[in-house]
């Protein structure tokens, strides 16, 4: 009788000794798809209607800073709203002595061109020379 009990318990233990990873893989693939879809939406920061252009993409290794001018003329550094007069100081605080930091200026196509150029002027006055105006590419 003792032998029969031992045999049953060993079969039961053998049956549960392996971990089924299929549900975990399924969950991980779903999460991967969710992050792949959501990631491009999270990088843009402030939503603006960019003008269209045939310009080639700007390449680089470092993560650029983003200065955005909304259609209402409000200026954002990354996702934080700031005043134009504070732009120089904020850029210097963030980038420090790295004056070769790339800065992308995203101006809504409805905003006055002078407002965009004021922002670019403040960036240049702070000593940053790698400034790029961001546009949407024209699809043919």
Image (cartoon, grey):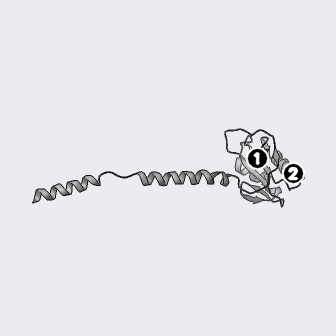
- Residue 125 at x, y = what percent? 83, 46
The crowd level at tag 1 (other Cα within 10 Å; few <14, some 14-19, many 20+) is some
Disc 2 and disc 1 in contact, CB within 8 angstroms = no
Image quarter of residue 61: top right
Q: Residue at x 20, y 57 (%)?
A: 9
Q: Relative to residue 34, is residue 86 drawn left or right? A: right
Q: Residue at x 11, y 59 (%)?
A: 2
Frontmost of labels 2 and 1 is 1
Return the residue nearer the eye: 105 or 129. 105
Return the residue nearer the eye: 57 or 102. 57
Image quarter of residue 82: bottom right
Image quarter of residue 115: bottom right
| Disc ID at residue 104 | 1
- Residue 10 at x, y = what percent? 20, 54
Q: Identify the element where label 2 is drawn.
A: helix
Q: Quadrant of the C terminus?
A: top right
Precedes in sequence: disc 2 or disc 1: 1
- Residue 25 at x, y = what percent? 45, 51
Report the residue that reaches farthest toward the left: 1
- Residue 120 at x, y = what percent? 83, 48
Residue with the mark numbered 2: 118
């Amino acid at each position: 009788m003792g032998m029969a009990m031992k045999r049953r318990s060993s079969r039961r233990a053998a049956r549960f000794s392996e971990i089924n990873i299929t549900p975990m893989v399924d969950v991980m693939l779903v999460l991967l798809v969710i992050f792949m879809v959501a990631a491009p939406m999270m990088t843009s920061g402030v939503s603006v209607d960019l003008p269209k252009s045939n310009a080639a993409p700007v390449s680089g290794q470092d993560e650029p800073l983003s200065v955005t001018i909304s259609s209402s003329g409000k200026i954002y550094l990354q996702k934080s709203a700031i005043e134009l007069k504070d732009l120089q100081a904020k850029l210097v605080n963030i980038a420090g002595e790295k004056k070769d930091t790339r800065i992308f200026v995203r101006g809504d196509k409805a905003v006055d061109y002078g407002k965009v150029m004021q922002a670019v002027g403040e960036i240049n006055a702070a000593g940053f020379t790698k400034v790029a105006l961001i546009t949407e590419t024209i699809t043919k």
